[in-house]
């Protein structure tokens, strides 16, 4: 089956043809209607004028003495001045006045004569056959006692009227030609401008399809295409932002895989080596207890990695259910301090708790401890020989938790990035035994949001960092 070939017409020519076609159709219709209106108007006035003179002649016939032709001569002179001729005829159609040697019978068709016989007037706006010229004619019957006695026929040449109509048509033709020329020129300008703007959009779309998002389509005109160009620019900017985000996430993903592989390899190698040494008897009996402690620590490190990733995926997929209750904040802070105090002392840090004993927080207990543990671990990791403060405050509407350290601080450019998954502010931290994988703070932020709370961070390089958590009251 052969494919049909579709003729391709550029949009520029489609616009030009449509503009010109609409103008031609509009002017043709307008010219025809206007010309017809003027012609009817002229002929209607002529018919009314002839009817008026015919009625006056018939009226005078009833009051003047029969056979007195003086008034008829007067009418002839009056009507000749207006280029109108009239003929009186009897009921047989014979001409009574003036005498016509060439044709003594009045020239009416059978249908017209039947109308006259019935006492009806007959008018013909434009006749070109019977009187050797173009005329408008009116025939009025003269009735007595319901019988046709005769009538009067009035003729008026319409050569002048036709010249007026012809001249009007010429003017309309000139107007059409001038307007058509102006329209073509204007359409060329407007169409080229429109095509240029569409071409700009097309080129921009082509650039985006090739992976170049640095496009900016000008939108100086406040119309639909201008709005489209503006929306297109916004779309390109969002695509560029999304593409950059995808690249960032891809880089983080690769880094994360490399980090996870490294972190998994280290404890697994340790566990495997120690297990093999114990099994084969390479490790002395007095060192076996130390080896078992090391195996336990590395195994817990692997469990922590798995749990952190599972928690993150549960939060992201809305599968994590919270069991909220009023919790004594100071007791929760004491538990966190007890669990992490040894790790803090290893780096020369001291943990302090500040706040009233009766402060409560409306939260899920396990997740609250997880939030506090992650933040305090982060503070310990980046603080050495310093202090870490755990504070609690409350207002009528919310509970405020502050965790402040005197550590190395965070670069202002990195503050917003610390919440991202896989992000690491310090690549050297991969050697630490907690928080290795850059997802702890990401989990913290999402857990706070699940509590309908807010978490903010303020930091100054070299002076320390403060995390502030605000949780609504029950």
Image: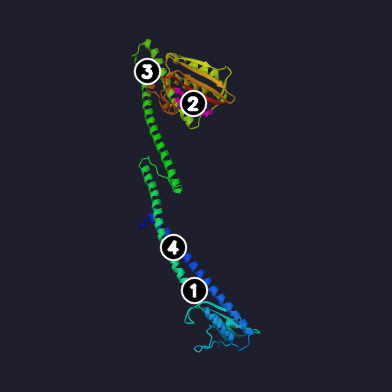
**Residue stretch in magenta:** 440-459
The secondary structure type at the circle numbered 1 is: helix
x then y, percent, for residue 394: 57, 22
Q: Which residue is mark 1?
A: 161
Can the viewer see residue 373 in this picture? Answer: yes
Q: Quadrant of the C terminus?
A: top right
Q: Which residue is mark 4?
A: 24
Which residue is depicted at the point 54% across and 23% down? Answer: 400
Q: Quadrant of the N terminus?
A: bottom left
* Crowdedness near tag 2: few (<14), some (14–19) or many (≥20) residues, C-alpha within 10 Å: few
Between disc 1 and disc 4, the foreground one is: 1
Residue 450 included in the magenta stretch of the image: yes
Name the side, left or right, on which 44 lies relative to 16.
right
Q: Nearer the viewer, residue 309 or 33?
A: 33
Name the side, left or right, on which 256 lies relative to 78.
left
Q: How many angstroms separate mark 1 from mark 2 (CA)?
A: 92 Å
x then y, percent, for residue 134: 48, 78
Between disc 3 and disc 1, the foreground one is: 1
């Amino acid at each position: 089956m052969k494919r049909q070939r579709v003729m391709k017409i550029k949009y520029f020519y489609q616009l030009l043809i449509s503009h010109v076609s609409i103008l031609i159709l509009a002017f043709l219709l307008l010219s025809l209607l206007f010309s017809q209106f003027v012609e009817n108007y002229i002929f209607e006035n002529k018919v009314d004028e002839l009817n008026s003179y015919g009625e006056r002649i018939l009226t005078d016939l009833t009051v003047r003495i029969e056979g007195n032709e003086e008034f008829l001569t007067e009418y002839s002179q009056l009507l000749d001045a207006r280029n109108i001729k009239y003929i009186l005829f009897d009921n047989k159609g014979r001409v009574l006045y003036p005498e016509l040697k060439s044709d003594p019978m009045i020239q009416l068709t059978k249908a017209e004569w039947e109308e006259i016989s019935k006492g009806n007037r007959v008018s013909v706006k434009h006749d070109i056959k019977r009187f050797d010229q173009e005329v408008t004619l009116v025939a009025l019957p003269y009735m007595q006692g319901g019988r046709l006695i005769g009538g009067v026929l009035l003729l008026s040449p319409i050569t002048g009227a036709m010249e007026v109509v012809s001249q009007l048509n010429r003017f309309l033709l000139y107007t059409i030609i001038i307007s058509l020329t102006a329209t073509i020129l204007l359409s060329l300008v407007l169409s080229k401008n429109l095509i240029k703007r569409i071409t700009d959009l097309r080129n921009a779309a082509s650039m985006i399809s090739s992976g170049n998002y640095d496009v900016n389509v000008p939108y100086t005109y406040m119309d639909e295409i201008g709005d489209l160009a503006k929306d297109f620019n916004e779309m390109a900017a969002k695509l560029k932002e999304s593409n950059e985000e995808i690249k960032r996430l891809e880089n983080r993903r690769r880094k994360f895989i490399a980090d996870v592989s490294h972190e998994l390899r280290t404890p697994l190698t340790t566990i495997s080596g120690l297990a093999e040494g114990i099994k084969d008897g390479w490790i002395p009996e007095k060192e076996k207890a130390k080896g078992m402690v090391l195996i336990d620590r590395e195994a817990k490190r692997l469990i922590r990695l798995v749990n952190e990733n599972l928690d993150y995926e549960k939060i992201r997929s809305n599968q994590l259910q919270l069991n909220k209750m009023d919790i004594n904040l100071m007791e929760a802070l004491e538990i966190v301090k007890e669990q992490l105090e040894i790790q803090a002392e290893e780096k020369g840090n001291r943990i302090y708790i500040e706040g009233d004993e009766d402060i409560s927080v409306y939260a899920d207990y396990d997740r609250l401890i997880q939030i506090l543990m992650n933040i305090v671990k982060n503070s310990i990791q980046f603080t050495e020989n310093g202090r870490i403060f755990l504070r609690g405050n409350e207002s009528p509407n919310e509970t405020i938790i502050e965790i402040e350290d005197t550590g190395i601080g965070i670069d202002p450019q990195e503050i917003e990035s610390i919440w991202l998954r896989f992000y690491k502010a310090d690549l050297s931290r991969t050697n630490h035994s907690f928080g290795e994988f850059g997802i702890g703070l990401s989990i913290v932020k999402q857990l706070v949001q699940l509590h309908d709370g807010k978490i903010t961070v303020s930091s100054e390089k070299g002076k320390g960092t403060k995390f502030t958590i605000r949780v609504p009251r029950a």
